[in-house]
Amino acid sequence: MTTLRRVTLDVLKPHEPSILAFTERVAEVESVDGVTASLIELDQEVQNIKITVEGTGLDYDAIEAAIDSLGGTVHSVDQVAYGEHVVEERRTTQDG
C-alpha cells in the first residue's frame, strides 16, 4: 500500500478560531509531522486558507475530521504526494 506524504487543501473556515489555533489543531493530528497555512481571502464571515500537511503516513480522514471539528470545510484537494518520498515539482519547457 502506498503512503500519503503531502496534501494541500483549499479550506473555508470561520474567523474563530484564529489561523494560528486552527493550524496548531491540524498539526496535533497523530499522523501529521508539519502543517503550513496561508490566508488566501478574507471576508466579513469567513476566511479562505490554503493548508499543506506533511507526514510519513498521513491519515486524510483524521485531518478532514479535525478541520470539520473547527468549523472548517475542505473545498478542494489541490495537490497530493504519495510514495516513499515527495517528488517536488520542477519547471519544464512546457511551463514557458
Image (tube, rainbow, N blue to C red):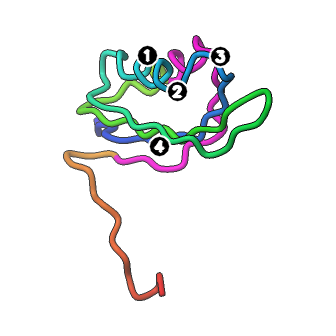
Mark toward the start of the polypeptide (2 vs 3): 2
Res 24 → quadrant: top left
Disc number placed over residue 71 in the picture, else none = 3
> Mark 1 and 4 residues: CB-CB less than 8 Å, in contact?
no
Amino acid beneath label 3: Gly
Residue 19, which numbered label?
2
Q: Name the residue under label 4.
A: 8
Q: How crowded is mark 2: few (under 14 residues within 10 Å), some or many (20 or more)?
A: some
Disc number lying in front (2 or 1): 2
Give the alpha-carbon distance from disc 2 to disc 1, as whole Å: 10 Å
The amino acid sitting under disc 2 is Ile
Sequence-wise first label, 1 or 4: 4
Asked whether the residues under the numbered discs 4 and 3 touch, taking CB atoms below 8 Å apart as contact, a structural biologist would say no
Location of the N terminus by quadrant is: top left
Q: Give the range drawn in magenta.
A: 64-81
Residue 90 occupies which quadrant of the picture?
A: bottom left
Q: Residue at x 40, y 88 (%)?
A: 93
Query: Can you give x and y, in whole percent of width and height, for residue 79 in the image?
Result: 47, 50
Query: Counting residues from the N terminus, which is met first, the one under dot 4 or under dot 3?
Result: 4
What label does residue 25 carry, if any? Answer: 1
| C-alpha span from label 4 to label 2 | 16 Å
Residue at x 67%, y 44% (from the top left corner): 41
